[in-house]
Image: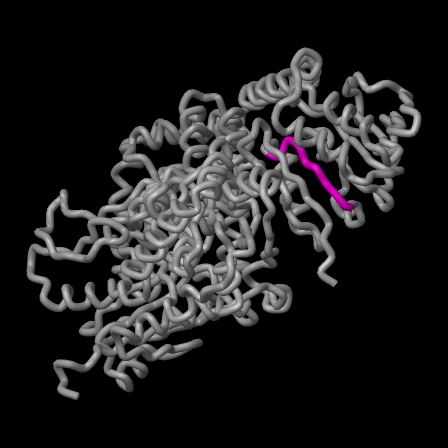
Amino acid sequence: MDSFLAKPRLLFFRTTQPSLPGYILQHAEEQVRCLSLFFDVEVINGDCDYDRICDIYQPDLALFESGVYSIKHEIRNTGTHPEVPKVGFLNADAYCESRAIFLADMARWGVETLFTLSVAMAEYTPEIADRLFVWPNFVNDLQFHDYGQPKVIPVLFTGSLAKHYPWRNRISRVVSAAYPTMTCPHLGWFNRGLTSRMVQGEAYARLLNSAHFVPACGTIAHEVVRKHFEIPAVGTCLIAERAESLLAAGFVDMENCVLAEESNVLDKLDYLFSKPEELVRITNAGYHLVHSQHTAKQRDQLLQWLNLHRRLAAGEKIVQAGPFAALEVVANSRKAANGYVISGGVDRELLRRGEAEQETGNYKAAQQLYRRCLNYHFMMREPILKLTECALAMGRPTDALEWIRKPISQSLEVRLASEPDPVEWAYFIRALLCKGEVLKAAHYAFEFPGLQHEELTRIRSALCQVGKGASPDLVVSGRRRASVHVRTNQDAHDWLIGLCKTLDACGQYSLSELLRSRSREFQSSISQISRAVPIRDVDGQDLTEVSVVRSSRSDCIRSRLGSWRHWIRSRLGPWRHWLVQRFFGPDNFGRFARQLAEQEPVKHAYIIGLSARRGFHRAVIKGFEANPSGSLVYHLPVSRQRSFIPEAFVFPGRARWSRGADVVSRGEFDASDCDIIFILGEVGASAVDVGRLSGVRTIVVDGISGQIGQQVNEWISELDGLTLVAYDPADRDGYAVYRRVSYA
């Protein structure tokens, strides 16, 4: 073949976790096959020497993958062969904690241009939006096509019902109560053994083809996932949540799909089942959309970039107007930028509301909103950092350290990243400083010499000022590291005032006064700090040898007054709970809990704690009253909480009630023969030993947006044999319902 007709050669550096499920490996193979339509692809797996590999293969482009399925591996000498352009591939959901690992890997390998399959990634990680292009999900048209299967399933539910799929959870409850449905369990993303029973490959495509309707959820980020394309591609009608990302992909409600919420999904299904010709028209239009615009043949974005990069002139740059748009060259200016959709994700909305409360000083309300957000994904980094900020503002540096250690430990110990996120590391140092541990803060501030970010530079500069006339002896070098966290454009003086206020809140008044007195020196030292060399005072003494500034007696008194203020506020909680329960009726979750109490075959049940929900207890009581099982229900209000449930209230042939306020404290709580347990509120959550719930068939956790409730919910979600059947962190204080399922 003539050289000008030959495909360019692509080196694809990819090292994934062992024992991934078959369908995940199939997705990875399809990505390679897609690239092979446009490149001569060579996949490089494991540790390697980039210089040697390039000498062997003489590539035109090098692609480096990092993300949710990747594991740590070494690629040495990536600074060689500057003539070979390098691009990165972020293979992860928009909210995934692996974004921080990806940014660390790309910085280590010297990769500037980035691609992702996530339509929402630019919104979630705006620091890289100007150099991030979308290589969207697509469908394998050789496998996903119309097999002509008879339509024997009215509505088919496939895919996970995990907490980050809230729309699918809501829709499944509504639709399954009104229409015959088939549900296929989803058994995870990382364990090949557990997922062996899942329908995969051609059998999965034929199953989709057998249904009239299949709902697909775009996660909390309102993404475009593979399932959005796979369903129409086999000649089945897609039901999905209305989202800007789907509109950008060409989906139009009642034209080529059904976009619905729980409030109108039944009306639309009723209409289309009564108008089969309309259903056929919509289904055919969706089939045409996917096969004409969303197969591997339309995913040549990397080849587009390479061709444009080769002829890029000075003063020009490559941009992508939208996630499904072609790449183009434009004049380099402030207005020249990649276009991306605002997904309107559930978690982003909770973050925005939390930030608004935080700005007004309403830290408790902000914390609740951030914990709601965190309940969708326990290791989501943005709400964890915000909870760290709130803890520091409330004068609780120990709590702040506990929060910020989570993502740092995930990066360095679990994912074995080369360095932490720079903003998270800066807040770890800030929390140590607010706790008065200046020596530790100084030590950790320069543990990663090459880690550069303005937030980290400022906290390092502040540490220069806490010694005896400290002045930095530093050299300017290094490049700024991107972070998953967005920081406001705050000048250095305002940043220092904010740090001093935080130090005051934490009782570190002497440190705060010292920093205020050295404001000018702080600002002048910022420009000098970039990489780690020992920070020394004017006498040449290492800062780590300088004694810690100790708080005065007045500092301690002010700190204790703050603690008394928090204690008084906390004592009002039980009264607020009682008033809400006493005078208001049940909410949506109260009605759902009543159904559980009424319909579950229950011989023994526990209610631990009290709920702040309107009439929740009354709804559960009525449910157990109507249960024909003759249930024995133990109510453990715990401690001195008040309860209107009677000491002994017997319903002949139905529920029998028993009170036991001190049972938990005496350690006599036994869940081994318990059919259902309600864990209510912060007090209820604090009284439960999660390890003793291993035999409970159904677990209801109410109040998961509270500090303890959120942690208990996280622990319960990790118990073996439990599956999540109902979940809504955004409903008041949030709730979760787990049911035991045996895979044996």
- The prevailing secondary structure element of the residues shown in magenta is strand
For image coordinates 70% across by 31% down, the residue present is 593
Quadrant showing the C terminus: bottom right
Q: Is residue 562 left or right of residue 359?
A: right
For image coordinates 45% across by 66% down, the residue present is 147
Q: Locate residue 553: give its quadrant.
A: top right
User: Outermost residue, bottom direction?
Assistant: 1
- Say whether residue 432 is visible: no
Q: Nearer the viewer, residue 446 or 455?
A: 455
Q: Is residue 136 left or right of residue 72?
A: left
Indicate whether residue 117 is drawn in magenta.
no
Answer above or below: position of 450 versus 382.
below
For image coordinates 52% across by 41% down, the residue present is 166
Which residues, given as a range, are shown in magenta? 697-704
Quadrant showing the N terminus: bottom left
Please state the horizontal and vertical placement of residue 379, each as a whole percent of the image: 52, 47
Indicate whether residue 698 is drawn in magenta.
yes
Q: Locate residue 720: give its quadrant.
A: bottom right
Q: Nearer the viewer, residue 739 or 488?
A: 739
Q: Is residue 659 left or right of residue 305?
A: right
- Say whether residue 349 is visible: yes
Numbered circles on residues, count: 0
- Colour convention: one colour
Q: Nearer the viewer, residue 411 or 511?
A: 411
Answer above or below: position of 278 versus 364.
below
Answer above or below: position of 201 versus 564.
below
Please state the horizontal and vertical placement of residue 551, each as a whole percent of the image: 53, 28
Please state the horizontal and vertical placement of residue 260, each as a whole percent of the image: 44, 38
Please state the horizontal and vertical placement of residue 119, each as a whole percent of the image: 34, 50
